[in-house]
Image (cartoon, helix red, strand yellow):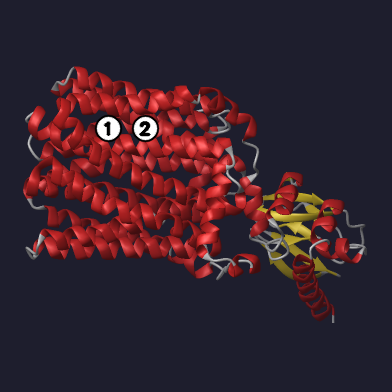
Amino acid sequence: MSRRAAPVIAGVFRNRDLRRVALSYAGFISAEYAVWIAMLVYAFGQGGATTAGLVALVQLVPAALFAPYGGVLADRRSPARVLFAGYVLQAAGMGATAIALIAGGPPVLAYAFAAVASTAVTITRPAQAVLVPELAREPDELTAFNVVSGWIESGCILVAPALTGLILGLSTVGAVFAICTVPALASAAALTGLVRRASRKSAPAESAVQGTLAELAEGVRAVGGTPASRLLVLLLGAEYVVIGAFDVLAVVLAIDVLDLGESGAGYLNTAMGAGAVLGAVATVMLIGRRRLALPVLGGAALMGAPLILLGAFPTVLGAFVLLAAVGVGRIVLDVSGRTLLQRVAQPDVLSRTFALLEALSMAGLALGSVLVPALVAVGGASAALIGAGILLPALALLRLRTLLAIDSMATVPIVELSLLRSMKIFTLLPAPVLEGLARSLVPERVPAGTVVIREGEPGDRFYAIADGEVDISAKGRALATRRRCEGFGEIALLKDTPRNATAVARTSVLLYGLEKEPFLTAVTGHAPAAHAAEEVVQERLVTVSAEGG
C-alpha cells in the first residue's frame, strides 16, 4: 500500500458517515449475491437451465425498466433517504420470498416476490453514487471509498456464495432468503443517522415542471452525447452480460459438467470471490492515480480471457484457478470504471447516469442468462463460456482509442461540486455555474488554533468547510461553531464591508477557499441564489447583533 493511500483509506474509516454507507453496502452485497444464487438453484431444480434463464429474465426485466426512475429519485430527493428506502424494500421482498418458499407456495409466487427484491436492488448504486461525493472530504477520499467498496464487494463475493452453498447443503432455498433478510434490514438500520440529518431535498423549480420521462430523456441524452460516459456505461453494462451468463453457467458447470452437485454452484462463485479479494488489494494503487483507462482495459481483458480458457479446458482445478482470475479482472474493471465514470459524468445528472448503468446492468444480466441456454443447446457449456469471454476484450479493443483518451476528459471536480451543492447559498445555482465555482476552489489544511479570518480586516475570500470545526466570534463573544458543509466569510463579500467576525479553527480543518470575484459573479448573477445568500446574511447579522447586545 502506498504511503499516500494508507492515510486516505484510514480517513474513509474515520469518516463516520462514509463508514455507515460502507457497512450498509456490505449487508446489501452479501444479501444480493446469496439470494441471486439461491433463486437460480431453485429455478434450475424446477426445470433445468431453460427455467433458470427464464426466471432470471423475470427478475431482471422489471429491474432494468425501473432503474432509470430510481436515478431520477436520487437526483431530485435526498440520496440518503432514497438509499434507505431501497434497503427497506429489498428486505421486504426477500422476506416475502422466504415465506412463499418455506410455506410451499407455487413457484410463480416466489418468483414474483424475488422480482420485487431484485427491482429494489437497482436503487442502491445510483443513490450511493450521489451520496458518497457529498460525504467525501477530498477527491482522493472518493476514490478511496470506491476502493473500499470494492474490498467489501470482493469479500462478499467470496463469503456469500460459500455460505449459500453451505446453507443449501444443510437446508433449503427458503432458508437462504430468510437469513438474507437480516443483513438487508441491517443495511437500512446503518443509515438511520444519515436519514435523520438529511434535508428533504426536492427537485429544483425547473425540474419540478418537467415530467419524469423528460428527466429520464435528459439523462440519456447526457450520457449519449458524451463519448467517454457512453463508452464506460456500455463497457460496464457488458460486464454484467458476462456475469449474467456465468451465474447460469456456474449451475450448469457444477451439476452437468464438473459433477459438483447443487452446492458446487456456490463454491464456483466463491472461487471468483477469492480472485476478487486479490484484485481488491491491487485497487489500492488506484488511489491518487489520475489515469484510469489502462486499469479499465486490463480488467476487461483479465475478466474475459480465463473464461475462454475454461471453455476450452473444463476441469475442476482449472475452473477454480481461472474463475479466481476472472474475479481479479472483475473487481479491477468495476472499481476503475465506476471511479472514472464519476469523474466524467455530468454532475447534475450523476444519479441518472448511474441509474442508466444499473438498467443496462440488469438488462445485461438478463441477456447473459437468456443467451446461455441457447449457446449450451448449440455447442454445450464450452461454447457458452467462450462466447461470454470474448465480449469484453472485443468491445474494449473496438473502442480502444476512445478508451485511452478518456483520462484527458476526466476533470469534473465531483467532491467539490457536492460540497457546494450541500450549502444553501449555492444549491440553486445552475450546474455549469456551480461547476465553474468548484473548479475555482482552493483546498487549504488549517491546524487547530489558526485564525482564518479576523474581525475588522478586509474580506477577500469565502470559505467552505469540508472537514473539522471552526469557531466564530465577534467583539470577544462566541457566536457559533461551523462544521462540514457550512461556510463563512460571505457577509464581507456581499456587503463590501470589513470582516464583522473572527473565525478560528477549533480542530484541524480542511477548507476550500473561493476568491471574492467568482463568488460575487456567481451568487449575485443568479436571482434565486442571491435571495438565498441574503437570507443567510440576515440570519447571521441577527446573531451578531443579539450576541453583541
Residue 290 seen by the camera:
no
Which is nearer the N-term, disc 2 or disc 1? 1
Q: Secondary structure at mark 2?
A: helix
Q: Amino acid at mark 1?
A: Met
**At which x and y percent is residue 311?**
21, 22
Label drawn at residue 443: none
In three-dimensional space, the C-alpha distance between marks 2 and 1, rounded to whole angstroms, equals: 9 Å
Res 287 visible? yes
Residue 486 % position (x, y): 68, 61
Q: Give percent across and percent down for residue 283.
A: 45, 31
The residue under the point 80% across, 75% down is 538
Residue type (three-letter) at the residue carrying disc 2: Arg
Q: Please tell me which residue is depicted at 64% across the width and 54% down the height of the picture.
A: 419
Q: Position of residue 354 (x, y in %)?
A: 48, 48
Left or right position of 127 against 305? right
Q: Is residue 236 left or right of residue 173?
A: right
Quarter that holds the C terminus: bottom right
Residue placed under numbered mark 2 in the picture: 330
Local crowd at mark 1 within 10 Å, few (<14), some, or many (≥20)?
many
Q: How many marks?
A: 2
Between 448 and 226, the residue placed more toward the observer is: 226
Return the residue at label 1: 272
Residue appearing at x 52%, y 39% in the figure: 230
53 and 349: which one is in front? 53
Residue density around tag 2, few if under 14, some if 14–19, many if 20 or more, within 10 Å: many
Mark 2 and mark 1 residues within 8 Å of each other at the beta carbon: yes
Q: Secondary structure at mark 1?
A: helix
